[in-house]
Image (cartoon, rainbow, N blue to C red):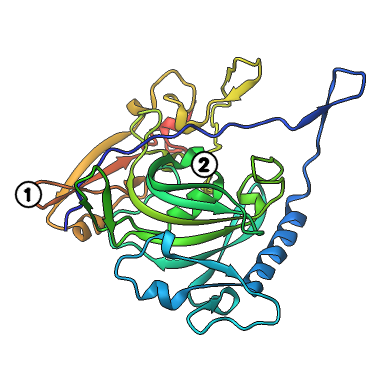
């Protein structure tokens, strides 16, 4: 069933804050030193595993529903000295079954985070960490204090959220379809759904937010409803492919250029925001070749044989006639030095 599309709602980009205090009687800021990320990850992992030992979810009730939402999922703290109800599952007991452990690397640190997979999502598309998503969610800390939620669908640019969101949402598919309810709202069908358990290093780490102390592991119940592909600088390369070093984030600045912000700080112009990634005066769009291929099925598009310097873009378009069109980017390397032209200033 072809998914009808509704407009994505955009959200603001992430804002970084300098954590500092004033000296008594002075004006120079005192920078608060961050904790060691590896040591903090060890502490966060222990805290999350302890949470799994003491909390259960209403597994039987949830799985019996025809089209559940995250509002139907209840995570409850086990009263000391009592047993888990017959219709519930201790999170610790779900480890390796529905509760998956995922390993990743960020900021030169090895991390483990956890995903309670409730529904994979029956839609065709899956976002990358550089894309837009439409989702609902509820965020809470390990003491079960809710700090934010969106009951109604809301759109996010994943590059403007915490790093853990991009890593988790990219592992789910969108909803299969949606139905208009007649009151201006819509109900989604067979959406991706789960709970992410993130160490602080994949969240806000040393930054505090309203309701979120610094160094807090975070939990988010979520539904992934829709997605759309981003090309932030409109240079022809989708943002997720501008991860030059392949480490899963977009903090790559090949030509090391900066712009001056209103507060006087120099701000890097990362490749996904830069129309000339190597600073050679030739636009990135003019140093790559973009072609399209149409096939009868999505699988046929995915099976197109590519050259070593080509990439098939993640987002494949279903045409009105039921065929599928894929976009192929050829990263030309004119001088054969192993660096594609758009990243080679020589």
Q: Residue 338: in sight, yes or no?
A: no
Residue 85 vertical position relative to residue 70 in the rendered view, above or below? below
Measured as percent of width and height from the top left, residue 229 is found at 34, 41
Residue labelled with disc 2:
161
The residues bearing labels 2 and 1 have C-alpha atoms spaced at a distance of: 37 Å
N-term-proximal mark, 2 vs 1? 2
Identity of the residue drawn at 66% across and 15% down: 264
Q: Residues within 10 Å of mark 2 (few under 14, many from 20)?
A: some
Identity of the residue drawn at 12% across and 56% down: 296
Relative to 280, is 204 on the left or the right?
Answer: right
Residue labelled with disc 1:
321
Please tell me whether mark 1 sits on a helix, a strand or a loop: loop
Relative to 244, is 316 on the left or the right?
Answer: left
Residue 335 vertical position relative to residue 320 in the rendered view, above or below? above
Measured as percent of width and height from the top left, residue 182 is found at 19, 47
Front one among 317 and 245: 317
Measured as percent of width and height from the top left, residue 30 is found at 84, 28
Measured as percent of width and height from the top left, residue 171 is found at 43, 59
């Amino acid at each position: 069933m072809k998914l009808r599309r509704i407009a994505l709602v955009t959200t603001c980009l992430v804002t970084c804050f300098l954590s500092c205090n004033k000296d008594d009687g002075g004006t120079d800021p005192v920078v608060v030193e961050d904790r060691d990320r590896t040591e903090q990850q060890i502490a966060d992992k222990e805290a999350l595993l302890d949470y799994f030992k003491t909390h259960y979810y209403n597994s039987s009730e949830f799985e019996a529903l025809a089209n559940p939402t995250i509002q139907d999922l209840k995570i409850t703290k086990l009263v000391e000295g009592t047993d888990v109800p017959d219709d519930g599952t201790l999170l610790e007991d779900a480890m390796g079954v529905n509760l998956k452990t995922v390993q990743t690397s960020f900021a030169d640190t090895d991390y483990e985070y956890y995903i309670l997979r409730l529904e994979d999502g029956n839609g065709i598309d899956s976002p990358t960490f550089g894309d837009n998503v439409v989702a609902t969610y509820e965020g809470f800390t390990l003491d079960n204090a809710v700090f934010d939620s969106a009951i109604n669908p809301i759109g996010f640019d994943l590059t403007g959220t915490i790093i853990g969101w991009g890593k988790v949402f990219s592992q789910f598919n969108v909803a299969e379809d949606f139905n208009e309810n007649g009151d201006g709202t819509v109900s989604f069908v067979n959406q991706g759904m789960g709970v992410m358990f993130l160490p602080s290093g994949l969240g806000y780490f040393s930054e505090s937010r309203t309701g979120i102390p610094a160094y807090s592991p975070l939990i988010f119940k979520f539904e992934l409803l829709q997605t759309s592909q981003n090309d932030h600088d409109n240079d022809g390369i989708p943002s997720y492919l501008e991860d030059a070093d392949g480490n899963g984030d977009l903090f790559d600045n090949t030509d090391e250029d900066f712009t001056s912000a209103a507060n006087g700080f120099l701000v890097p112009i990362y490749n996904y925001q830069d129309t000339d990634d190597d600073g050679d005066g030739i636009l990135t769009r003019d140093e790559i070749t973009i072609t399209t291929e149409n096939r009868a099925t999505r699988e046929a598009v995915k099976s197109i044989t590519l050259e070593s310097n080509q990439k098939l873009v993640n987002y494949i378009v279903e045409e009105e006639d039921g065929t599928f069109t894929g976009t192929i980017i050829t990263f030309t390397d004119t001088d054969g030095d192993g660096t594609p032209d758009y990243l080679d200033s020589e």
